[in-house]
Image: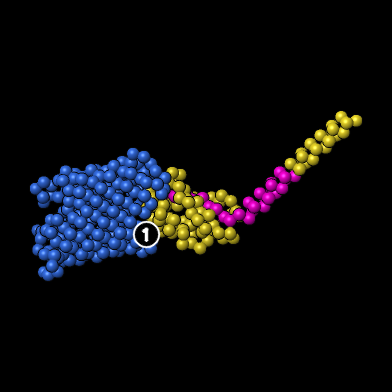
C-alpha cells in the first residue's frame, strides 16, 4: 500500500510539474517512421517507432541503463495528448509508456519485468524552446524511481526550412535517489530537414549525443 | 526631294515600329490572359503551429501523397504553405483542412492564387 501511495504521489508530482524527456517530438506525421538514438549520463537508447497517426506512435526501444547496468527492451507507445498551435509557436503534451523486460546481467537470463511512464510538456517558437518532463521507471526487484528533466534552448539565428538550424541549450536532470541528484548538460542542437543531432557535455564529465532521423 | 523622301521614310518607319510594338504588346497581353485562365490551381494556406523543419516535412509528406498535388512549398517565416496542383485538378477546402488537422496543425484560411477557384 505504501508502495502504491508513493507511486501515486510521484505521478501527481509529475503531472503538476509537467515533467519531460530529452526526446523531441516522439510522434511523427501519419505514416512516418522515426529513428532516435539517445546517449547521456544515465542511459544509451535506440528507439524506432512508426506513427499511424499524428497523435500516436508505436515502436520498440532498446536501452542500457547506467543505474543498474541492465539492458531493457520495451514496446513503447507515444501519445500526443494535446497540442496548441499558435500563429508563431507550438506547445505539446506527450505521454510515453514502455512495457517490456530488463536483462540485469546482460546474458539473457533472469529477465525481469520492466516498464516506464513519462509525461512531458514542451513549448517552442523559432527562437526559444522550453521542455519539462517527468518519468517513473520500474523494474521488478528494484524500487520505482522517479526522475525529471528540464531544458531551455535559444536559437542565435532563425533559418529557413531546409537550412541548418542551430540551438544552444541547457538541460538539467534531477534524479532524487542519487546522492548528487542534479546533472547539468550544456548542449548544441543542429537541425536540418529530417535530421536532428545534439551534442553536449555534462558537469559529471559525461557526453550527451542524441540523434533523430525521420522518414 | 531627298530630304522629303528621308523624312517620309523616318515617319513611315516610326509608324511601323510603333504599330508593331503595339501589336506585340497586344499579343503578349492576350497570351497572358489566356494562360492565367488555364493555369493549374495554386492555393496559399495559412497554418498555425509551423515552427520547425519537422512540421514542414510533415505537411510535405502528407500533401505529397495527394494525387492532385504537383508540389508544395512551406514557408516557416510567413506560416504559409503553397500547394501547386496538377492541371485540371482541384482539392476541396474541407479536404485541405482535414489533412492539416490530421497532421497535427491548425488550418487558418486559404486563398486561390491563380486558376479557377
Residue A212 spot, x, y in % from top left: 30, 55
Q: How is the image coloured?
A: by chain
For the N terminus of chain A, give its image quadrant.
Answer: bottom left
Which chain does the blue colour mark? Answer: A
Left/right of residue B23 with respect to residue A7 in the rendered view: right
Rendered residue at 76%/39% (across/down): B18
Rendered residue at 17%/59% (across/down): A64
Q: Is residue B44 magenta?
A: yes
Which residues are drawn in magenta? B23-48
User: Which residue is label 1 attached to?
Assistant: A215
**In this orientation, does residue A20 appear?**
no
Query: Which colour is chain B painted?
Result: yellow
Rendered residue at 63%/55% (across/down): B38
Left/right of residue B89 with respect to residue A164 in the rendered view: right
Left/right of residue A13 with respect to residue A33 in the rendered view: left
Residue B94 spot, x, y in % from top left: 49, 58
For the C terminus of chain A, give its image quadrant.
Answer: bottom left
Seen as rendered, the residue at the extreme front is: B2
Q: Nearer the viewer, residue A211 or B5?
A: B5
Whether residue A190 is situated above or below residue A215 in the rendered picture:
above
Name the main secondary structure of what is drawn in magenta.
Answer: helix
Residue A85 spot, x, y in % from top left: 38, 49
**In this orientation, does residue B23 appear?**
yes
Rendered residue at 53%/52% (across/down): B43
Q: Chain of mark 1?
A: A
Q: Nearer the viewer, residue B68 or A54?
A: B68
Residue A183 spot, x, y in % from top left: 16, 46
> Tag 1: Cα neighbours inside 10 Å, few (<14), some, or many (≥20)?
some
Q: Is residue A158 magenta?
A: no
Amino acid at each position: 500500500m505504501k508502495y502504491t501511495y508513493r507511486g501515486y504521489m510521484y505521478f501527481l508530482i509529475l503531472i503538476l510539474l509537467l515533467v519531460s524527456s530529452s526526446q523531441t517530438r516522439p510522434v511523427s506525421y501519419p505514416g512516418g517512421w522515426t529513428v532516435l538514438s539517445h546517449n547521456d549520463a544515465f542511459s544509451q537508447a535506440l528507439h524506432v517507432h512508426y506513427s499511424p497517426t499524428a497523435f500516436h506512435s508505436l515502436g520498440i526501444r532498446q536501452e542500457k541503463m547506467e543505474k543498474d547496468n541492465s539492458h531493457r527492451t520495451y514496446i513503447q507507445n507515444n501519445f500526443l495528448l494535446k497540442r496548441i498551435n499558435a500563429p508563431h509557436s507550438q506547445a505539446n503534451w506527450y505521454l510515453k509508456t514502455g512495457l517490456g523486460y530488463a536483462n540485469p546481467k546482460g546474458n539473457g537470463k533472469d529477465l525481469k519485468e520492466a516498464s516506464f511512464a513519462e509525461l512531458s510538456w514542451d513549448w517552442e517558437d523559432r527562437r526559444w524552446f522550453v521542455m519539462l518532463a517527468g518519468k517513473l521507471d520500474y523494474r521488478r526487484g528494484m524500487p520505482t524511481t522517479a526522475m525529471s528533466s528540464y531544458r531551455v534552448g535559444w536559437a542565435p539565428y532563425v533559418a529557413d526550412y531546409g537550412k541548418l538550424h542551430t540551438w544552444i541549450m541547457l538541460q538539467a536532470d534531477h534524479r532524487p535517489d542519487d546522492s548528487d541528484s542534479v546533472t547539468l548538460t550544456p548542449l548544441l542542437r543542429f537541425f536540418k530537414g529530417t535530421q536532428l543531432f545534439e551534442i553536449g557535455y555534462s558537469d559529471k564529465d559525461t557526453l550527451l549525443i542524441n540523434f533523430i532521423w525521420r522518414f | 526631294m531627298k530630304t522629303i523622301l528621308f523624312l517620309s521614310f523616318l515617319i513611315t518607319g516610326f509608324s511601323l515600329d510603333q504599330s508593331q510594338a503595339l501589336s506585340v504588346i497586344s499579343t503578349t497581353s492576350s497570351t497572358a490572359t489566356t494562360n492565367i485562365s488555364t493555369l493549374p490551381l495554386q492555393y496559399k494556406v495559412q497554418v498555425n503551429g509551423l515552427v520547425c523543419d519537422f512540421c514542414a516535412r510533415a505537411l510535405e509528406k502528407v500533401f505529397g501523397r495527394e494525387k492532385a498535388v504537383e508540389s508544395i512549398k512551406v514557408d516557416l517565416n510567413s506560416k504559409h504553405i503553397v500547394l501547386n496542383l496538377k492541371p485540371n485538378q482541384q482539392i476541396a477546402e474541407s479536404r485541405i483542412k482535414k489533412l492539416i488537422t490530421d497532421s497535427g496543425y491548425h488550418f487558418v484560411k486559404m486563398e486561390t492564387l491563380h486558376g479557377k477557384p
